Image (spheres, rainbow, N blue to C red):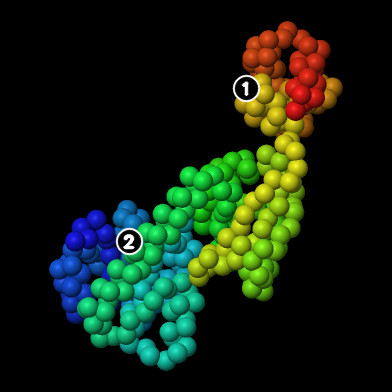
Amino acid sequence: MNTNQIILVIDDSPDSLGMINEALSASGYSVLVALSAETAFTIMNTIRPDLILLDAIMPGMDGFETCTILKRTPGLSDIPIIFMTGLSQPEYIVKALTTGGVDYVQKPVIPSEVLARIRVHIGNAHKTQSAREALDHAGRHLLALDIRGRLLWATPKAASLLNHDMKEGESILPPEAESWVLTCARRNTPAGARRSFDFPHAETTSLELTYMGQTRPGEYLLRLTAIQHKREEFILRERLSLTMREAEVLLWLGRGKTNRDIAEILSISPRTINKHLEQVYTKIGVENRASATAVVMNALQDS
């Protein structure tokens, strides 16, 4: 039985919905139904299905446009979508797959065929999720982008290396790096192409991106590699148990900058700089700027 698996059926035909609902329910699936794409999106605001059966031809927003939007929507982009269509022309089948569908069945659908395809694609989706969890556990520096350069998923190590709380659907690479990745994707560049870029907020001054190729429709995999020593503020943060902002303030103090200079560099008020330094002095056990500068120099030399 599949009591924990949810199938969303999007079809404007009540007759089709009734027949498919009966077959899926008899096989133990929890079934949600929607007569339009708009209703489906409302449902998915609160419930995330394991798979979507999507009618290609519907009034208003058709299945192709619906699929395109889903593949661009954070949190929903990796749901497998099976098209249901009465269109047998090759161009429509190609369109169903290129917009993000994993499969298609022709109407009138045969329940046993639909059930077999559902089992395969839910199984593949679960294997993909398990593989990502394994990569997370192994500490790999990997991330995946869509064709627009927006994040689909990333391992924790990749997020840590970029010093970024990454959210699905956002752009997380510097513009020149994103442009390079998208060029690789559009030109079907062989896996293994690599290039280095400056990442202003990353833990290292520069990172190497390796293009690993397309892992599935609309998903492009990258590996991150640190190629330079850690930035000095990260060294101070780790060695002296400071927050990132405290480490930045202390680093500029060690470079001889006044509180006002540091405030301008970091775009915060001089009063905030004073508060940070009070905390820093307590944490590193000093009482003045000269002693704090000596601590900075020793920490960086030891690294």
In 3D space, how far apart are the residues under numbered discs 1 and 2 (Cα atoms)? 43 Å
**Residue at image point 33% right, 70% down:** 120
Q: Quadrant of residue 58?
A: bottom left
**Residue at image point 38% right, 90% down:** 88
Q: Quadrant of the N terminus?
A: bottom left
**Image coordinates for residue 276, horizontal then vertical, percent:** 66, 20
Q: Quadrant of residue 81?
A: bottom left
**Image coordinates for residue 184, horizontal then vertical, percent:** 67, 68
Q: Amino acid at mark 1?
A: Ser
* Relative to 30, 131 lies left or right: right
Is residue 199 in view from this perspective? no
Rendered view: 120 above or below 136:
below
Rendered view: 241 above or below 108:
above
Direction bottom: furthest residue: 89
Say which mark, if any, is on residue 194: none
Is residue 135 in view from this perspective? yes
Q: Amino acid at mark 2?
A: Asp
Q: Quadrant of residue 147?
A: bottom right
Disc 1: CA contacts within 10 A as few (<14), some (14-19) or many (>=20): some
Direction top: furthest residue: 287
Towards the viewer: 219 or 35: 219
**Residue at image point 61% right, 51% down:** 172
Secondary structure, mark 2, is loop
Say which mark, if any, is on residue 50: 2
Disc 2: CA contacts within 10 A as few (<14), some (14-19) or many (>=20): many
* Relative to 271, 43 lies left or right: left
Rendered view: 194 above or below 139:
below
Direction front: furthest residue: 138
Which residue corresponds to mark 1? Answer: 241
